[in-house]
Image (spheres, rainbow, N blue to C red):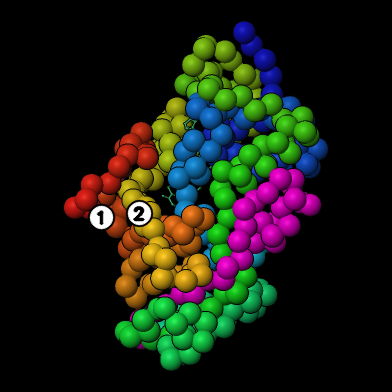
Amino acid sequence: MRRTADAVIIGGGVTGASLAFHLASRGVKGVVVLERKFLAAGGTGRSVGVIRQLYPSPETCRMVLSSLRVFQNFREVVGGDSGYVGCGALIGVSPAMLPSLERSLEIQREVGIRAELLPPHELARLEPRIDPSGLGAVLHEPESGYGDPTAVTLGYAAAARDRGVAIEQGVAVTEIRVDGGRVTGVVTQTGESIDSRVVVNAAGLWAGAVAALAGITLPIVVGRHPVFIVKRGAAFGPPHPVYLDLAGGTYVRPETGDLTLTGSLVEDETRHPMDPELLGSEAGFEEA
Ligand SMILES: Cc1cc2nc3c(=O)[nH]c(=O)nc-3n(C[C@H](O)[C@H](O)[C@H](O)COP(=O)(O)OP(=O)(O)OC[C@H]3O[C@@H](n4cnc5c(N)ncnc54)[C@H](O)[C@@H]3O)c2cc1C
């Protein structure tokens, strides 16, 4: 079988679903999303979903602020529920990290992000359950928090379908056809060909493998990031905000059912490269 599409998107995670929605909203007809498993089956469905606004450049800060407004107004802008909870985020840094945090705060203010820098002794005013010793300062982002990555993906996908996008699950792309240095389409695992001059690699953790189908090498290292779920005791009190402890290298984010998600913030992916097929595998007690 052979058919034609104006754009083929490989991957039905949050990137593929959002892109499909935005292309269709701008009038692109004939968009096809091919997802080898099911929507949000990849990194998206495993994401901690923290929405914070501390990023190192004006471009990334503008992007995150614009995303935040979408999460906050998801029902009106896209449809469905993003699961956004604006519980606020606190970001603790060591004294040595303070100059770079101050530079980032300047960028945040320039682009219109609400954030304030607190000396450690003022932390108790917002969250007395955090021990401020060893901290140089704490950044408070009152509008940050967390969202539900799967719900966001399903919301984008439903809105994309309403705008004419075909979303096909259980369909893996096994070949990308290239002619004279230009992409001409894809072939799926059933042998079906879809002709398209636009093929988007939205395969997330598998982006390297998908790029290789077109003869392209991407310098991507897939790192392992175990997330641990702990139950807060009855004496803990109300849920805590999102807290990123950049000095200590850990984070916590509240979840329903008195649960807290936690993990490491140390970027050591190259020491723990992971086969993406192992996504979702259990972490051992030693690793915890
Ligand atoms: C444990 C964890 C915690 C995270 N925490 C946060 C956080 O707190 N805040 C934050 O902003 N981000 C976080 N992230 C990152 C965020 O989840 C990702 O950046 C985002 O979900 C990536 O989405 P994606 O659509 O690009 O990729 P993915 O969700 O990985 O989607 C790619 C899709 O492509 C499909 N696919 C692969 N190969 C093929 C093929 N050949 N044919 C068809 N389909 C294919 C896969 O099945 C998959 O569904 C976290 C990620 C993880 C794993």
Label at residue 269? none
| Image quarter of residue 66 | bottom right
Is the residue under label 2 in contact with that under label 1 (CB below 8 Å)? yes
| Residue at (43% x, 91% y) in the render | 121
Q: What element carries label 2?
A: strand
Position of 155 with respect to 99 (left or right) is right
Label at residue 288? 1
Question: Which residue is situated farthest in the top direction here?
Answer: 1
Question: Which residue is situated farthest in the front direction here?
Answer: 234
| Residue at (46% x, 86% y) in the render | 124
Q: Which percent across, then down, holds residue 217?
A: 40, 38
First along the sequence among labels 1 and 2: 2
Q: Give the range drawn in magenta.
A: 67-96
| Image quarter of residue 10 | top right
Tell me which amino acid carries mark 2.
Answer: Phe
| Residue at (63% x, 39% y) in the render | 154
Q: Distance between the residues labelled 1 and 2?
A: 8 Å
Position of 182 with respect to 233 (left or right) is right
Q: Which percent across, then down, holds residue 63?
A: 62, 61
| Residue at (29% x, 57% y) in the render | 268
**Is 58 drawn above or below residue 19 in the view shown?**
below
**Is 246 drawn above or below residue 167 in the view shown?**
below
Q: Which of 207 and 211 is in front in this view?
A: 207
Based on the picture, tell me whether residue 213 belongs to the magenta stretch: no
Q: Which percent across, then down, holds residue 223?
A: 34, 48
Tell me which amino acid carries mark 1.
Answer: Ala
**Is 213 drawn above or below residue 235 in the view shown?**
above
Residue highlighted by disc 2: 228
Q: Nearer the viewer, residue 137 or 192?
A: 137
